């Protein structure tokens, strides 16, 4: 796993304020000592912290990502919304799209597809989340669900080089549960077969303990980390253990 770049994406969800950015100091000094390793580190804070976080990490290798955006890349009368070009203008290089917490609020594959297309136009890289629910897993239709999400979500997108796929089983998010390593391996193999040349991350309850198992799955290109990324010590520990 150590011969290629490994992604670590911190999804802070709806947590954090200006003070929370101080916790990045530890990560920044850790990275200086860790620079021999091939690592891509992306912080996705709430939209309110995009600009201050971008300013803070300017001289480091850390990149900034947003957690969602409106489907229209132009300005418009959309109260409370933020589009992809606005995200770009405050330093975001990535945007997470298709996260199950937003699918749960009603985002469907067509809407996600529009968001992806327009975010690419704005010059953002996409972290495209897909994953099955627990009942879909029990019905053994995981691959069918993932294929559906991939084919609808990536419809009419020929050049996929700026799309990273994050496989996040819904039942694993925030639950402390993860699939067996062999299952993750097989699902990632399946995704890579369907989307040729794609990078695929695993997300869902990644923590300082299970990373010792997850890091051995050799087709994983990195991790999308929610809860554990909000604590710098834990996040650093996850990164260190991955390369140990
Ligand atoms: C997520 O929601 O993207 C996620 C990975 O969350 P957690 O690590 O907390 O399960």
Image (cartoon, helix red, strand yellow):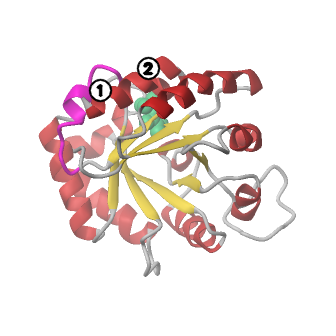
Instruction: Name which residue lies at 37% across and 35% down.
Output: 204
Residue 22 on image: x %, y %: 68, 22
Residue 43 on image: x %, y %: 56, 40
Which region of the structure is painted magenta? Answer: 205-219
Q: Quadrant of the N terminus?
A: top left
Instruction: Name which residue lies at 47% across and 45% down.
Output: 100
The residue beneath circle 2 is 234
**Residue 15 vs residue 198, the one in the foreground:** 198
Residue 175 on image: x %, y %: 38, 25
> Does the magenta stretch mainly form a helix, a strand or a loop?
loop
| Residue 167 shown left or right of residue 188 in the figure | right
**Residue 127 vs residue 37, the one in the foreground:** 37
Q: Is residue 149 inside the magenta stretch? A: no
Secondary structure of the residue carrying numbered label 1: helix
The residue beneath circle 1 is 241
Residue 215 position by quadrant: top left
| Label 1 CA crowd tier, 10 Å (few <14, some 14–19, many 20+) | few
């Amino acid at each position: 796993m150590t011969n290629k770049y490994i992604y670590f994406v911190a999804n802070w969800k709806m947590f954090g304020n200006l003070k929370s950015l101080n916790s990045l100091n530890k990560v920044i000094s850790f990275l200086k000592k860790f620079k021999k390793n091939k690592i891509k580190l992306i912080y996705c804070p709430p939209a309110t912290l995009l600009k201050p976080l971008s300013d803070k990490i300017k001289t480091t290798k850390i990149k900034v990502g947003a957690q969602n955006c409106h489907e229209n890349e132009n300005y418009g009368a959309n109260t409370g919304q933020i589009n992809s070009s606005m995200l770009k203008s405050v330093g975001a290089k990535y945007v997470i799209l298709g996260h199950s917490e937003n699918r749960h609020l009603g985002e469907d594959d067509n809407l996600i597809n529009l968001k992806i297309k327009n975010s690419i136009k704005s010059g953002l890289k996409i972290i495209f989340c897909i994953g099955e629910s627990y009942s879909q897993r029990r019905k053994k239709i995981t691959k069918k669900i993932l294929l559906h999400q991939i084919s609808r979500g990536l419809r009419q997108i020929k050049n996929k080089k700026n799309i990273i796929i994050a496989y996040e089983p819904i039942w694993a998010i925030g639950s402390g549960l993860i699939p067996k390593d062999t299952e993750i391996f097989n699902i990632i193999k399946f995704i890579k077969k369907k989307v040729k040349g794609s990078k695929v991350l695993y997300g869902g309850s990644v923590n300082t303990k299970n990373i010792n198992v997850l890091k051995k799955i050799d087709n994983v290109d990195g991790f999308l980390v929610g809860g554990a990324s909000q604590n710098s010590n834990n996040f650093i520990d996850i990164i260190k253990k991955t390369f140990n």
